[in-house]
Amino acid sequence: MESADVEDFIEQNLHLSDLVETFRSISESNKHWKSRREFIFRNINDYEDPHLDHLLALSMVWANHVFLGCRYNPVLLEEVKVMAEGIIVEDAPVFKTRDELIKQQQKR
């Protein structure tokens, strides 16, 4: 589902949009929430009650990885990356692992 498709989906499902808005964390910036909200809308049809909590957890894993650089099990990360395909996050931070930093220091 493209970003424009997500916006069309929201317009056609205002009741669902209101529900999804309740999932926003008080600490999420607008950019963070916009991206996580798109992740949720792209995948919500695959996770209806009582599995909605699982989708919300996956959306947090994806957002934490993208915005905070958190690392998770590679299988889990691959799953959320596939779920997030096509989501464009502008000015996403770039993180380096400890190993990458050490390797960079050793080259000097």
Image (cartoon, rainbow, N blue to C red):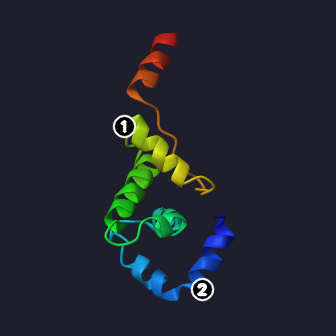
* Residue 70 position by quadrant: top left
- Give the number of the disc on residue 84: none
Q: Residue at x 36, y 73 (%)?
A: 23
In the rendered image, the vertical position of residue 56 relative to residue 22, given as above or below: above
Q: Along the polypeptide, which appears first: circle 2 or circle 1?
A: 2
Residue 108 visible in the current orientation: no
Q: Residue at x 39, y 62 (%)?
A: 55
- Where's the N terminus, which quadrant? bottom right
**Residue 28 locus on image (x, y percent):** 39, 65
Q: Residue at x 34, y 69 (%)?
A: 25
Instruction: Tell me the element at label 2.
Output: helix
Identity of the amino acid at label 2? Gln
Q: Residue at x 68, y 71 (%)?
A: 4
**Residue 95 locus on image (x, y percent):** 47, 38
In the rendered image, the vertical position of residue 81 relative to residue 36, given as above or below: above
Identity of the amino acid at label 1? Asn
Which residue is label 2 attached to? 12
- Give the number of the disc on residue 73: 1
* Residue 18 position by quadrant: bottom left
Query: For mark 1, does the 10 Å Cα neighbourhood hold few (<14), some (14 to 19), or many (20 or more) residues?
Result: few
Instruction: Tell me the element at label 1.
Output: loop
Distance between the Cα atoms at labels 2 and 1? 36 Å
Residue 49 visible in the current orientation: yes
**Residue 22 locus on image (x, y percent):** 36, 78
Near-viewer residue (57 or 66): 57
* Residue 57 position by quadrant: bottom left
